[in-house]
Amino acid sequence: MKIALIAHDGKKADMVHFLSGYKSQLHHADIELVATGTTGSHIERAGFNVRKLLSGPLGGDAQIASMAATKELAMVIFFRDPLDKHPHEPDVQMLMRICDVHNIPLATNPAAANLMFEQLTKDFDGK
């Protein structure tokens, strides 16, 4: 199972904090993490194995959208900063549209991501 992780600059710490709450489940499950470049670096420094793609504005968002379009992803977690302007907003919108078109679960905030991970870890725990 492959999970894509993206976080705008103001949300990278939130992403690391979120993942830290599921560290043992992620290390024991057969889950591959992929992330945009800078987000991936933060996640890697927190002790997670992650495949880093390009930075979001340099094409990382598009790389993840391509994986979603080809059904390589089980889910996308994209902690967006809705109060800031982003030069790659068209790529962000394209990624969200691709997730909708291909029915890929997409969480854009920690509350939604928690719900999705609770289900995921429930499935792995066999409950």
Image (cartoon, helix red, strand yellow):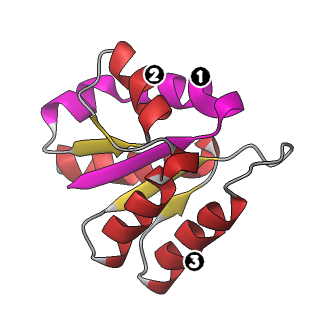
* Classed neighbour count for the residue bearing mark 3: other residues with Cα under 10 Å, few (<14), some (14–19), many (≥20): some
Nearer the N terminus, badge 2 or badge 1?
Answer: 1
Q: Which residue lies at the image location 41% right of the left edge and 24% below the top edge?
A: 41
The foreground one among 122 and 21 is 21
Outermost right residue: 83
Q: Is residue 73 visible?
A: yes
The foreground one among 17 and 95 is 95
Residue type at mark 3?
Answer: Arg
Whether pointer 2 and pointer 1 mark residues with C-beta atoms closer than 8 Å, the reply is yes
Left or right placement of residue 42 versus residue 97 in this view: left
Residue type at mark 1?
Answer: Ala
Seen in the picture, residue 89 relative to 7 is either above or below; the reply is: below
Left or right placement of residue 96 versus residue 43 in this view: right
Residue 25 % position (x, y): 25, 32
Q: Which residue lies at the image location 35% right of the left edge and 44% below the top edge?
A: 53
Q: Which residues are magenta?
A: 1-28
* Label 2, label 1: how far apart the Cα atoms are: 8 Å
Q: Which mark is residue 97?
A: 3
Which corner quadrant of the image does residue 50 belong to? top left
Q: Tell me the chief SS of the magenta region.
A: helix
Q: Which mark is residue 42?
A: 2
Outermost bottom residue: 101
The residue identified by callout 1 is 13
Nearer the N terminus, badge 3 or badge 1?
Answer: 1
Q: Which residue lies at the image location 41% right of the left edge and 82% below the top edge?
A: 102
